[in-house]
Image (cartoon, rainbow, N blue to C red):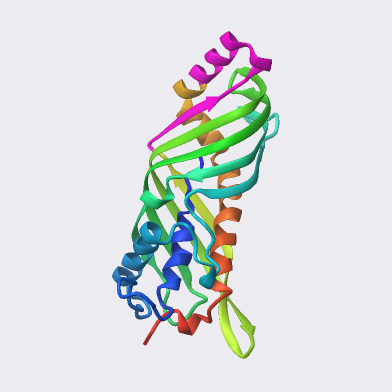
């Protein structure tokens, strides 16, 4: 369920476009508030620069190294779990498409928004879970593959000016990532200490009830994705002054 957004990373990439390009195929700088130009630039970086670019502090975004993701929800929630994803990566960002942008004008303190369509995004790595999902107890640790199909990723934040070396840079604030999948598929290996019958039944239950499960963990999951996406964007924004990301 971790689409990957990273998609946000794409945004950061988009800013990079504004630096002087060494190659003729790189996008030209955009004017402040030129949404169409910005979207073209973001999609260029999603396709062509998804392995990262050290010159602009852009790290690899397909796959995205998620570090450790933790989802904890209390007993008053229908999905009462303590779930940790470690050594996970998000695959599929390179095939995402940015289709809407808002903000990015001369006043960097305004609200900014980017929207992406993500055909397929998969969170693959190791997991450990304990708790209850809807009516069933769940426990186990092993390999996971959680895949989202036809997801919309929405990234929203407010800009905060940061003065450094006589220049003004933008830092994200009140960052919010919203992920809306059309379908989610779960595969958790080695559930219930490797009991195949119980594990197969639980995976079947998860996939049959994916919508209700995702609705219950949406807020907690979005907070984790927001941390990941904001760190990618801030890393790029910290490289170049805001007034040099665009042209008049």
Q: Is residue 244 left or right of residue 133?
A: left
The span shown in magenta is 182-205
At 64% from the left and 88% from the top, the residue drawn is: 165
Quadrant where the image shows the C terminus: bottom left
On whether residue 202 falls in the magenta region, the answer is yes
Q: Is residue 184 in view from this perspective?
A: yes
Closer to the camera, 217 or 187?
A: 187
Residue 34: image location, x then y, percent = 32, 75
On whether residue 30 falls in the magenta region, the answer is no
Closer to the camera, 223 or 43?
A: 43
Residue 214: image location, x then y, percent = 51, 34
Residue 174: image location, x then y, percent = 58, 62
Quarter of the image for residue 31 reads bottom left
Q: Looking at the image, which residue sits at the far bottom?
A: 166
Q: Is residue 188 above or below residue 37?
A: above
Quarter of the image for residue 151 reads top left
At 55% from the left and 34% from the top, the residue drawn is: 216
At 35% from the left and 70% from the top, the residue drawn is: 38
Q: Is residue 155 in view from this perspective?
A: no
How many numbered badges does the structure rendering display? 0
At 45% from the left and 72% from the top, the residue drawn is: 16
Q: Looking at the image, which residue sits at the far front?
A: 23
């Amino acid at each position: 369920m971790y689409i990957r957004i990273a998609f946000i990373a794409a945004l950061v990439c988009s800013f990079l476009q504004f630096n002087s390009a060494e190659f003729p195929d790189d996008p030209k700088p955009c004017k402040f508030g030129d949404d169409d130009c910005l979207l073209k630039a973001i999609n260029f970086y999603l396709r062509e620069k998804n392995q990262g670019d050290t010159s602009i502090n852009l790290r690899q975004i397909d796959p995205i190294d998620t570090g450790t993701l933790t989802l904890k929800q209390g007993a008053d929630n229908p999905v009462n779990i303590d779930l940790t994803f470690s050594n996970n990566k998000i695959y599929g960002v390179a095939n995402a498409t940015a289709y809407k942008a808002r903000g990015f004008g001369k006043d960097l303190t305004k609200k900014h928004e980017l929207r992406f369509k993500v055909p397929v995004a998969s969170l693959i790595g190791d997991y450990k879970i304990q708790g209850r999902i809807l009516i069933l107890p769940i426990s186990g640790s092993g390999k996971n593959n959680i895949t989202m199909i036809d997801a919309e990723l929405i990234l929203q934040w407010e800009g905060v000016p940061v003065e450094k070396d006589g220049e003004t840079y933008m830092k994200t604030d009140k960052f919010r990532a919203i992920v809306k999948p059309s379908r989610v598929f779960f595969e958790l290996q080695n559930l219930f200490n490797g009991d195949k019958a119980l594990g197969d039944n639980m995976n079947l239950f998860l996939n049959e009830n994916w919508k209700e499960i995702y609705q219950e963990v949406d807020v907690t999951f979005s907070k984790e994705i927001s941390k990941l996406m904001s760190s990618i964007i801030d890393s790029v924004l910290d490289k170049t002054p805001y007034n040099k990301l665009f042209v008049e």
